[in-house]
Image (tube, rainbow, N blue to C red):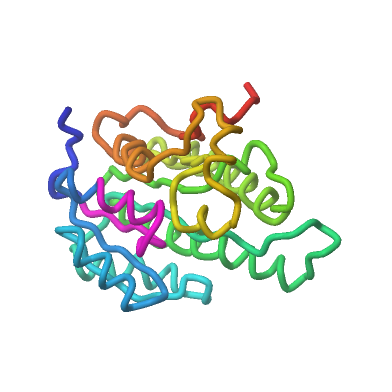
Amino acid sequence: MDLGLQGKRAAVQGASSGLGFAIAKVLASEGANVVICSRDFARIQAAANSIPNTHPLALDLDQPGKGVEFVQKTVEILGGIDILVTNSGGPPKGDFEGLSLKDWEAGYRRLWQSAIESIREAIPLMKAQKSGRILLSTSTAAKEPIPHLTISNAYRSGLLGLMKSLSLELASSYITVNALLPGFTRTKRMEDWGVPLDQIAQGVPMGRLAEPEEFGALAAFLASTHASYITGQAIACDGGLLKGI
């Protein structure tokens, strides 16, 4: 299936490794030109070297204003923006009573600040061209809380409210807004949890972890011309992990 992504201009946050890298890789394989960013220049440069049609930026999106700068630099490099993927690492872990106000502030900066800044900067450009795709890469925690990830559970659920509101506001401009909810995926971050991956896989109805490319494929489809009538949706790639209807 031709996804209609040839020559599209995409910006993917948090793409030096893991899910962001997988999304960028699949978009580039479909012919999109992709700007990718990470706070570490060496890592994002290495990622760009391994994916054709990609351009690296070293930006710490936890810092105020960097989400705006990310979109502005994307436009400088590519001449515009058709696809924006917001993506970040996880916020501080812990139960509510063990988390400080500074932890909550750090979680907001990581999960909300860069997303809001980037989306606000991209919307006028997408409105002017009467097309666009905004994808919020989040987590199954947005729908089903994960123990000991209180900040993630709270803020990621809120991102779904933002996604739904934006989808209603932007539909008349032919801009779609959707959320992607990865389940347990075979990434370095999962390995760093220190829990055997086969043990984690036992809790997934499909009996295995997702491969990052499977999540990237979902993102590429939602960014494609075939998904032009899909908006305001939170779609999980989780092997049946979510139990809610």
Tell me where the magenta segment starts and ends, as one range: 9-26
Q: Is 51 in front, or is 156? A: 51
| Residue at (23% x, 59% y) in the render | 80
Question: Residue 181: x percent and y percent?
Answer: 51, 40
Q: Is residue 173 visible?
A: no
At x 58%, y 48%, the residue is 159
User: Is there any visible trace of residue 231 in the rendered image?
Assistant: yes
In the picture, the quarter occupied by the N terminus is top left
Q: Could you tell me how many numbered marks the image carries?
A: 0
Residue 198 on image: x %, y %: 53, 40
Q: Is residue 40 above or below residue 4?
A: below
- The C terminus lies in which quarter of the figure? top right
Q: Is residue 94 magenta?
A: no
Q: Residue at x 56, y 31 (%)?
A: 204
244 sits left or right of 133 in the view: right
- Left or right, 14 with respect to 155, comes to left
Q: Residue furthest top?
A: 245
- Quadrant in the rendering for residue 101: bottom right
Q: Is residue 193 left or right of residue 206?
A: right
Say if 243 sits above or below 75 in the image: above
Which is more toward the observer, 86 or 51?
A: 51
Residue for point 55% across, 45% down: 139
Location of residue 137 in the rendering, given as x and y in whole percent from the top left corner: 46, 48
Q: Residue furthest right?
A: 97
Counting from the top left corner in percent of width and height, residue 141 is at 62, 43
